[in-house]
């Protein structure tokens, strides 16, 4: 089977044959599995073909342990003598129903986390609460005043940006990677129209932890929501914008209106084969709306969508280097 965009596949060829790509961010979870309402719904929502999606799996709240190691949300709590203390800067764990309970674990500090997150990073998992009281699993990596927000695609998960996040941390950045509502270990909720509130909660956490400036980044609707949340009244100073396969609009979330307010260096990336050209058309609309003097549109010929252009394409490593170099350059120029 030739390479193809997961989103295009879910709506086109994959929908026709009754199968879909499971959101796995380039991991072994990206195998073709039985089609789910979740994957198709999220893909349609991302490009404005549905006004909203209801949450689709799981209805059992998972309570944080009083003591215990990492466990599956559906299994028994494996007790340990003395769990590691929650770092002072962390938010307390919260009891809620995760979106994908079959792929949710509990950290030793009680936070819920997608099982795709490597064990070595799970102590850096935290729980965010949005303005409409939805609880999100998130990775708070690194430290310092230079913050980077990395928002994943609808239908994917928190692991979309882990590789880039780790590399940025090694360069001295503070990185926040939230997992959207109705995804992974974040809360299952019937409200899915205001996903920009998830990005806003992540930005608020970056500020609380000490970030003084931020680069807004995301893939697919993650880039759209990052831009919209980043131009809020109480925003951090924006040093740059990264949008990978990001549509001009995700439901009611309008990136074009937001991008017009961002004059920082901006990088737009898209593959012309993604959703038979529909994504490229929307990315070009957003690119044209940008007032940034330093802006660039990269046309990736792989045919993949979002971070799959990095994880699955033949030249993915080169594109990842381009993204990291852009982020480095944006912060250098902001000084």
Image (cartoon, rainbow, N blue to C red):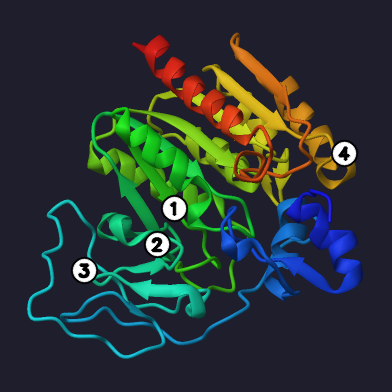
Query: How far, Cα to Cα, is label 4 from label 3?
Result: 45 Å
* Rendered view: 199 above or below 210: below
Q: Is mark 3 on a helix, strand or loop?
A: loop
Classify residue 174 as left or right of residue 2.
left
Mark found first going from the N terminus, 1 or 4 = 1
Q: Is mark 4 on a helix, strand or loop?
A: helix
Query: How far, Cα to Cα, is label 1 from label 4?
Result: 28 Å
Q: In which quarter of the image is residue 17?
A: bottom right
Tell me the residue that label 3 is attached to. Answer: 109
| Disc number for residue 178 | 1
Mark found first going from the N terminus, 1 or 2 = 2
* Rendered view: 93 above or below 231: below
Evaluate whether residue 192 shows in this view.
no
Query: How far, Cα to Cα, is label 1 from label 3?
Result: 18 Å
Evaluate whether residue 151 shows in this view.
yes
Q: Residues within 10 Å of mark 3 (few under 14, many from 20)?
A: many
For the point 18% across and 85% down, which residue is it? 79
Task: Judge by depth and name the residue closer to the eye, 268 or 195.
Answer: 268
For the point 82% across and 53% down, which residue is it? 8
Asked if labels 3 and 1 touch by Cβ distance under 8 angstroms, the answer is no
Classify residue 82 as left or right of residue 36.
left
Q: How crowded is mark 1: few (under 14 residues within 10 Å), some or many (20 or more)?
A: many
Q: Which of marks 1 and 3 is in front?
A: 3
Mark found first going from the N terminus, 4 or 3 = 3
Tell me the residue that label 2 is attached to. Answer: 137
Asked if labels 2 and 1 touch by Cβ distance under 8 angstroms, the answer is yes
């Amino acid at each position: 089977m030739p390479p193809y965009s997961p989103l295009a596949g879910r709506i086109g060829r994959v929908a026709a044959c009754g199968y879909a790509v499971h959101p796995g961010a380039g991991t072994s979870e990206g195998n073709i599995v039985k089609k789910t309402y979740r994957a198709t719904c999220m893909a349609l929502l991302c490009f404005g073909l549905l006004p909203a999606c209801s949450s689709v799996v799981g209805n059992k709240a998972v309570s944080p342990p009083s003591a215990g190691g990492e466990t599956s949300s559906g299994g028994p709590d494996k007790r340990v003598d003395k769990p590691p203390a929650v770092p002072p800067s962390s938010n307390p764990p919260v009891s809620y129903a995760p979106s994908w309970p079959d792929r949710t674990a509990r950290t030793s500090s009680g936070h819920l986390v997608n099982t795709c997150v490597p064990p070595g990073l799970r102590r850096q998992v935290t729980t965010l609460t949005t303005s409409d009281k939805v609880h999100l699993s998130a990775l708070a990596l690194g430290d310092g005043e230079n913050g980077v927000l990395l928002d994943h695609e609808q239908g994917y998960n928190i692991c979309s940006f882990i590789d880039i996040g780790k590399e940025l941390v090694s360069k001295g950045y503070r990185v926040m990677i939230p997992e959207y509502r109705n995804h992974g270990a974040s809360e299952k909720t019937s409200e899915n129209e205001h996903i920009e509130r998830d990005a806003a909660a992540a930005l608020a956490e970056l500020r609380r932890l000490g970030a003084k400036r931020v680069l807004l980044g995301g893939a697919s609707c993650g880039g759209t929501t990052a831009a919209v949340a980043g131009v809020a009244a109480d925003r951090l100073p924006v040093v740059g914008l990264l949008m990978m396969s990001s549509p001009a609009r995700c439901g009611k979330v309008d990136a074009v209106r937001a991008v017009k307010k961002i004059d920082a260096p901006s990088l737009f990336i898209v593959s012309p084969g993604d959703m038979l050209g529909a994504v490229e058309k929307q990315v070009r609309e957003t690119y044209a709306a940008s007032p940034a003097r330093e802006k660039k549109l990269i046309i990736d010929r792989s045919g993949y969508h979002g971070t799959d252009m990095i994880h699955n394409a033949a030249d993915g490593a080169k594109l990842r280097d381009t993204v990291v170099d852009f982020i480095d350059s944006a912060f250098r120029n902001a000084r």
